[in-house]
Amino acid sequence: MACYYKYSPIQQSNQASKCKTDINIKVKCNDGNDDGNRETDAFRAVNTETQIIEEIDTFYKVLFQEEQFDIGDIYNSNNSTFVPRRSGVYYVAGTVTFLADDGTIPYRVRVEIRVNGVSVAADNDYWAEIDDQFLYVNAINVNTILQLEAGDLVEVFLTSTTPGIIETNTPNLSTRFEAARFR
């Protein structure tokens, strides 16, 4: 078995050596008493109701009604918005499962992450070769790392060139919004 350690002479010289098995890991845990020293703010929310997309080429705000967790009180499930309480660098992701009303015609669907109303990250999916014997469900994921200021408004939007629905979050279909602050 070979072991390599970042910046180790073993890795640089590729010489065989005995692996070190002692590991010293420091873990900081939150005991539930919020003393302002927590390491991370994070949330994950999912869609619990089908959302209808009727108008083509129109942006719809994607709704994520159920908070699965919210460390730092940064997510509002009433209006599906993430508002960081502390400035910093955040990983932000949104996944939307879309089902077209007519799955036999080619279409494009776009999901965006917006900060204060401005698109900062997006993903487009285009479906052209469609076999009418199968039901196609399209899961579009957009994610990014952002430098956010306390009080920024972060949301997920979707547009499509065909009518359809945003599916609810289930074990097989994923419609979710999540973020975490880096230390």
Image: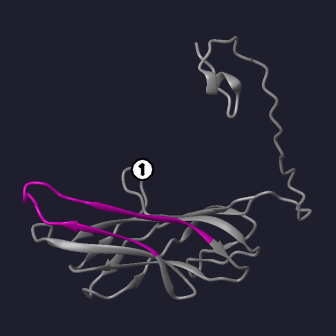
Q: Quadrant of residue 80?
A: bottom right
Residue type of the residue flagged with mark 1: Pro
Left or right: 89 as drawn, with respect to 174: right
Which residue is drawn at the image coordinates 46% and 66% (left, top)?
48
On-image quarter of the N terminus: top right
Residue 112 seen anywhere in this rendered image of the structure: yes
Q: Is residue 175 magenta?
A: no
From the viewer's perspective, is residue 68 above or below residue 111?
above
> Residue 102: percent from the left, percent from the top?
14, 72
Q: Which residue is mark 1?
A: 171
From the viewer's perspective, is residue 139 above or below residue 79?
above
Residue 70 seen anywhere in this rendered image of the structure: no
**What secondary structure do most residues of the magenta stretch adopt?**
strand
Q: Is residue 137 magenta?
A: yes
**Label 1 residue SS:** loop
> Residue 23: percent from the left, percent from the top?
78, 25
> Residue 46: percent from the left, percent from the top?
51, 64
Which residue is drawn at the image coordinates 59% and 74% (left, top)?
77
Q: Which residues are magenta?
A: 121-146
Which residue is drawn at the image coordinates 10% and 61% (left, top)?
129
Work out whether residue 65 or residue 35 is closer to the camera in this orientation and state it: 35
Instruction: Mark 1: give few (<14), some (14-19) or many (20+) Cα within 10 Å.
Output: few
